[in-house]
Image (cartoon, grey):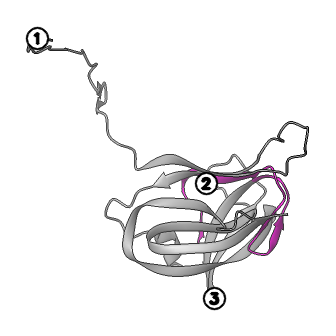
Amino acid sequence: MNGRLLALFVLVPSLATAQGPLKAALSSRATVEAALNPPREAGKPAPKALVIKIEYGQPHARGREVPAELSKVETIWRTGANSSTTLTTDADLEIGGASVPKGAYSLYSVRTEGGYQLIINSNTGQWGTQYDKSKDVARVALTARTLAESRESLQIALVPASDQAPKGVLTIVWGKLELSTTWSAK
């Protein structure tokens, strides 16, 4: 460039709308996946990985006490924001000791007198607050732990086992609350 400065101008459309300036949403969408690789047979193409996926609305605390829905006993929480949190699995699973056949499910959480539970529900595609108890597949106990540092955004994870076995821990973390249970492929 021979010591010359090159100026580049880009025209950016205004971020204002007829209703006023745009604002950030109070939640975003997030997805977590775990891929399970079936054994490979000699001389054959590698089989397709089996996927376990959780899609959820990711709320952000923005100064609120969270998760407020789990502060009251027997109040169902959609375990996310907006539409229901969805678990889809290509493999039969065991979650917290409960059998979960391959398919699609909604996940909810509830605080009980004795702790917390994860609810696995066969109704999917609905708004997160449209919970139908008659569609429950299982309710499993969640282990609760208080964190030293608060997490601003909800985080759901499928943490794999260190030995590469098709199992691990499902964690749900928001604020200073961490809830967890085991998962494994059958």
Snapshot quadrant of residue 123: bottom right
Q: Quadrant of the N terminus?
A: top left
Q: Amino acid at mark 2?
A: Gly
Q: Quadrant of the C terminus?
A: bottom right
**Mark 3 to mark 2 CA distance (whole Å):** 24 Å
Is residue 78 something one can see in this rendering? no
Q: Which residue is mark 1?
A: 2
Mark in front: 1 vs 2: 1
In what element is the residue under mark 2?
Answer: loop
Mark in front: 1 vs 3: 1
Spot occupied by residue 136 in the image (x, y as percentages of width and height): 78, 65
Spot occupied by residue 177 in the image (x, y as percentages of width and height): 48, 74
* Residue 1 versus residue 84 in the image, above or below: above
Snapshot quadrant of residue 135: bottom right
Spot occupied by residue 71 in the image (x, y as percentages of width and height): 49, 77
Prevalent SS, magenta region: strand
Q: Crowding at label 3, few (<14), some or many (≥20) Cα neighbours within 10 Å? A: few
The residue that appears at 14% across and 14% down in the rendered structure is 7
Q: Which residue is mark 2?
A: 128
Q: Is residue 27 left or right of residue 6?
A: right
The residue that appears at 10% across and 15% down in the rendered structure is 5
The residue that appears at 67% across and 48% down in the rendered structure is 126
Is residue 5 something one can see in this rendering? yes
In what element is the residue under mark 3?
Answer: loop
Q: Crowding at label 1, few (<14), some or many (≥20) Cα neighbours within 10 Å? A: few
Q: Which residue is mark 3?
A: 114
Q: Nearer the viewer, residue 46 or 53?
A: 46
- The part of the chain drawn in magenta is 75-104
Q: Crowding at label 2, few (<14), some or many (≥20) Cα neighbours within 10 Å? A: many
The reply to whether the magenta stretch includes residue 171 is: no
